[in-house]
Amino acid sequence: MVTAIGTLIANPGLEEIGHWGASLSLVVSGWTFLVWLSNWRWLVRSLVVIGAVIAFIPHLAILSWAFTIAASAIMAAKETHCFHFWAGKVIPWYSLVLGIGVLIGLPAIIQGLLWLGLAALWAFLMAGRLKLPLFVID
């Protein structure tokens, strides 16, 4: 969300803060990612750690986003596979469109709106996840 706002108001500093926050939160999400196949777990962990490290290197934010967006798309796809969330079916494809949009340099207003859209999709997925009766044992 912060990245979207920073992009929309053309504030590179705010964009960068949003990026750092997203990268660090994805490290936590990726490191605690639950999936049976260890190679997928380690792929996601590697993507988020590399993305977070690169996020703090000036002028490499776009490369960092490639790693972090890929990791979040994998996590969304897994959540959808397990729990059938509609947003999880859209997030990987939407992330690809967003990534291409950033790479080709779409206008900032469009990029900002795309970031807002991704934030909304994740909000829907997380709302569905919060409704699950996890850790409830009858």
Image (spheres, helix red, strand yellow):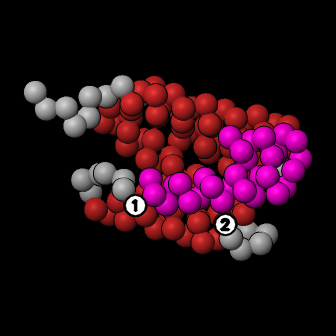
Choose between 62 and 101: the one closer to the eye.
Answer: 62
Dot 1 or dot 2: first in sequence order is 1
Q: What residue would you read off at disc 1?
A: 31
Task: Give the x, y percent position of residue 41.
Answer: 35, 59
Q: Residue at x 67, y 66 (%)?
A: 55
Q: Residue at x 74, y 42 (%)?
A: 4
Measured in 3D between alpha carbons, the distance from the residue under mark 1 to the one under mark 2, in whole angstroms, is: 17 Å
Choose between 99 and 44: the one closer to the eye.
Answer: 44
Q: Is residue 21 visible?
A: yes
Circle 2: residue type: Ala
Which label belongs to residue 55? 2
Secondary structure of residue under mark 2: helix
Task: Give the x, y percent position of residue 133.
Answer: 26, 28
CB contact under 8 Å: marks 1 and 2: no
Q: Residue at x 68, y 40 (%)?
A: 1
Circle 1: residue type: Trp
- In the image, 15: left or right of 39? right
Residue 109 lies in quadrant? top right
Per the picture, the main secondary structure of the magenta-coloured stretch is helix
Residue 110 lies in quadrant? top right
Answer whether residue 20 is magenta in the image. Answer: yes
> Magenta part of the protein: which range?
1-29
